[in-house]
Image (tube, rainbow, N blue to C red):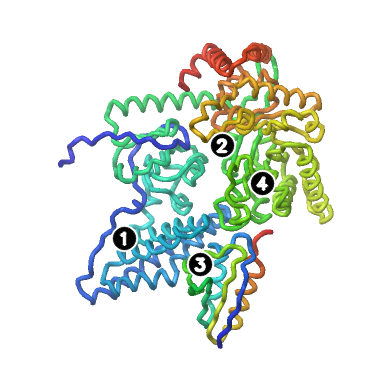
């Protein structure tokens, strides 16, 4: 099963080390292949370093793409993180 | 070359960030960018062994970090541990591992070389990113990478924790993970290639009162482990392999420095009372909770200025209310201080949010910063105010608002402050009953309407650094006009006197927390101008107190009357310096 979802980064600081680390943690236990895409660049969501190279500031749009049996769950868990602004203080 | 050949003496100038003199043996920590061994594997069969070696180094590195994390779990701030987590995640990074092993396999090269290629690739990618925060992540990748390289070389972390007594630590830069592993209290001095007054090394050195010089650029290649090294943290100099004559001179200097310090420290806790019984409050300026102990030790009556900017910067996300609160509470409830004045955020928004709307301003000193920024980003401001008020339940707290330029700003600030108070009350969250509010007097417009402002606040705190810049219209950082930065300019003195009088009329206290307050040569002038409190870098408190205790308020007033009759800054400066030199012969000759 392949699941794709476009998300908008909401938190002030964008995808920085801590938020990227939260994504890596969310993906770690999954049995799917998970990728993030921005402006045509695709990286493995299991690599903190590669996520950082996407350089996503606030309001940038990223595509999450998962392929595997728990694709839906893992995309949803990333969506929750992004939507909640990674728990950053307001 | 033989071992007996005398080594060449080398003097390197850097930035002194923690005063004092240290003489000891150099210990090089982690020679970053030291030439790593590079070789082709002779035999394809060695590839598997090389990959195994790389994986073991990763595992060892991770174990080291986990061990540090365990040890410091309860002691250190959340931020440091978070950095360790990022480093651990980098060590486990799929791409880092894959690319390095690929390099080993495909190019048939050793693990060190293969890893260096991977690290360089990330350095390239990050350096092109148009985002300052992200660019700085290069240093995290480097820290993690250096740890792996060290383990590949078979050097374990014992080299850091096992640094001998009296060692002078020399490094390219030190990360929190590095200093956490050292027995810092046993180290004699620090010298680093990189860094400035606010780098991690500087903060640690000041907190432990260890002489330190940073920004030396190449000291890691100029000194070797085992070299004799002198650190002069006061002058910002490092001497490698000093000849016997220099050693003798510095030993004397060190003895002298320590005797003076000792005798000053012995009296540091005594109150700052003039011979005619006038009491002056002495505060310490701090940036970190760790500095409170040193403030008390050096004789501060209270914390006169707690700068909170460091809670915001050098981090990846906004601090939570809880993080603010923990820091403020720690300061407020410290033993040995009678009050703590917490200043709200005093930088431009660009310092902690990578928001394109807050792009670089032409003239940031006069731009959207401090209270202006807070009044625009009210939600952020409220997080800080809530935390300060919550902390005020644990000790006497004053709140200080920076860069107020007029009445509207002040009233708006007070309105928000009272709103936060009301919210806390509604939610049943305790806060101090008598939290005094004050404003920084640093904009000339505020100084001129001081009478009106004084009726709305509990205290003034004069920030001389900005007041002088704004009043004299000079940018201190601009070398071509910095000569015009004159604290004793008649205009500046008149503004100070005006503010003190306005405060007196309204019955509120007037403090001073700029650099001028910590210049012993100006102490008599400031006493004579009638300030109630001087707040300064903790290390100078003993000197300022000594002066206060050996003069009368009456003679200080006379001195001020005299200098107010001059009409140039240079006349005043000359007169004051000359007066102080005559009166305190010993003290001011040492300073020169």
Label 2 environment density (alpha carbons within 10 Å; few <14, some 14–19, many ≥20) = some
Of label 2 and label 1, which has the lower sequence position?
Answer: 1
Task: Name the residue that disc number 1 marks.
Answer: B154
Q: What is the CA distance from the residue labelled 2 to the residue labelled 4?
A: 17 Å
Task: Name the residue that disc number 3 marks.
Answer: A54
The quadrant the N terminus of chain B occupies is top left
Proximity of marks 2 and 1: CB atoms separated by less than 8 Å: no
- Is disc 2 on the same chain as disc 3? no
Q: What is the CA distance from the residue labelled 2 to the residue labelled 1?
A: 39 Å
Task: Name the residue that disc number 4 marks.
Answer: B328
What SS does tag 3 mark? loop
- Percent from the top left, x then y, of residue B436? 76, 38
Q: Nearer the viewer, mark 3 or mark 2?
A: 3
* B301 and B243: which is toward the camera: B243
Badge 2: chain ID: B
* Residue drawn at 38 percent across, 48 percent down: B172
Residue farthest to the left, as pictured: B1
């Amino acid at each position: 099963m392949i699941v794709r979802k476009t998300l908008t980064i909401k938190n002030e600081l964008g995808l920085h080390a801590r938020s990227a680390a939260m994504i890596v943690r969310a993906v770690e236990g999954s049995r799917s292949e998970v990728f993030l895409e921005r402006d045509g660049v695709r990286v493995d969501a299991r690599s903190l370093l590669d996520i950082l190279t996407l350089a996503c500031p606030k309001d940038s749009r990223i595509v999450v793409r998962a392929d595997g049996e728990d694709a839906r769950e893992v995309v949803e868990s990333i969506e929750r993180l992004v939507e909640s602004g990674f728990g950053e203080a307001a | 070359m033989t071992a007996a050949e005398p080594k060449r003496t080398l003097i390197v100038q850097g930035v002194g960030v923690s005063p004092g003199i240290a003489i000891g043996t150099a210990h090089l920590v982690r020679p970053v960018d030291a030439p790593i061994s590079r070789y082709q594997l002779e035999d394809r069969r060695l590839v598997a062994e090389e990959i195994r070696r790389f994986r073991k180094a990763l595992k060892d590195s991770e174990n080291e970090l986990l061990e540090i994390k365990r040890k410091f779990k309860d002691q250190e701030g959340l931020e440091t541990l978070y950095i360790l987590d990022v480093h651990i995640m980098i060590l486990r990074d799929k791409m880092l591992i894959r690319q390095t092993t690929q390099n080993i396999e495909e190019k048939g090269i050793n693990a060190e070389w293969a890893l260096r290629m991977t690290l360089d690739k990330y350095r390239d990618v990050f350096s092109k990113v148009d985002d300052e925060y992200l660019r700085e992540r290069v240093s995290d990748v480097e820290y993690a990478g250096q740890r792996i390289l060290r383990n590949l070389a078979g050097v374990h972390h014992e080299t850091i924790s096992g640094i001998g007594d009296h060692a002078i630590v020399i490094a390219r830069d030190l990360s929190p993970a590095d200093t956490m592993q050292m027995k810092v209290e046993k180290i004699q001095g620090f010298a680093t290639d990189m860094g400035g007054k606010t780098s991690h090394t500087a903060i640690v050195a000041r907190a432990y009162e260890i002489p330190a010089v940073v920004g030396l650029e190449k000291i890691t290649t100029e000194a070797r482990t085992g070299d004799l090294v002198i650190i002069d943290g006061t002058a910002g100099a490092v001497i490698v392999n000093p000849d016997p004559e220099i050693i003798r001179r510095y030993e004397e200097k060190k003895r002298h420095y320590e005797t003076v310090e000792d005798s000053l420290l012995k009296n540091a806790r005594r109150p700052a009372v003039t011979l005619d019984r006038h009491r002056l409050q002495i505060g310490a300026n701090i940036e970190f909770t760790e500095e409170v102990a040193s403030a008390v030790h050096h004789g501060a009556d209270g914390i006169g200025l707690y700068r909170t900017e460091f809670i915001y910067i050098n981090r990846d996300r906004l601090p939570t209310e809880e993080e603010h609160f923990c820091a403020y509470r720690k300061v407020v409830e410290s033993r040995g201080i009678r009050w703590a004045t917490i200043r709200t955020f005093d930088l431009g928004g660009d310092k902690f949010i990578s928001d394109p709307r807050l792009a670089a301003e032409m003239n940031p000193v006069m731009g959207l910063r401090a209270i202006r920024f807070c009044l625009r980003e009210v939600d952020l401001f409220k997080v800080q105010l809530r935390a300060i008020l919550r902390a005020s339940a644990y000790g006497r707290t004053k709140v200080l608002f920076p860069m107020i330029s007029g009445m509207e700003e002040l009233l708006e600030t007070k309105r928000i402050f009272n709103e936060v108070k009301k919210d806390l009350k509604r939610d049943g969250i305790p806060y101090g009953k008598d939290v005094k509010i004050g404003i920084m007097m640093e904009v000339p417009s505020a100084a001129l309407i001081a009478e009106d402002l004084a009726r709305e606040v509990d205290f003034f705190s004069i920030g001389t650094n900005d007041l002088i810049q704004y009043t004299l219209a000079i940018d201190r950082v601009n070398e071509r006009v910095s000569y015009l930065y004159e604290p004793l300019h008649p205009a500046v003195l008149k503004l100070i006197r005006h503010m003190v009088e306005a405060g007196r009329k309204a019955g509120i206290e007037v403090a001073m927390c700029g650099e001028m307050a910590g210049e012993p040569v100006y102490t008599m002038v400031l006493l004579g101008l009638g300030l109630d409190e001087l707040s300064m870098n903790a290390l100078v408190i003993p000197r300022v107190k000594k002066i206060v205790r050996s003069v009368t308020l009456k003679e200080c007033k006379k001195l001020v009357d005299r200098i107010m009759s001059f009409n140039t800054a240079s006349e005043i400066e000359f007169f004051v310096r000359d007066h102080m030199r005559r009166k305190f012969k010993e003290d001011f000759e040492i300073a020169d």
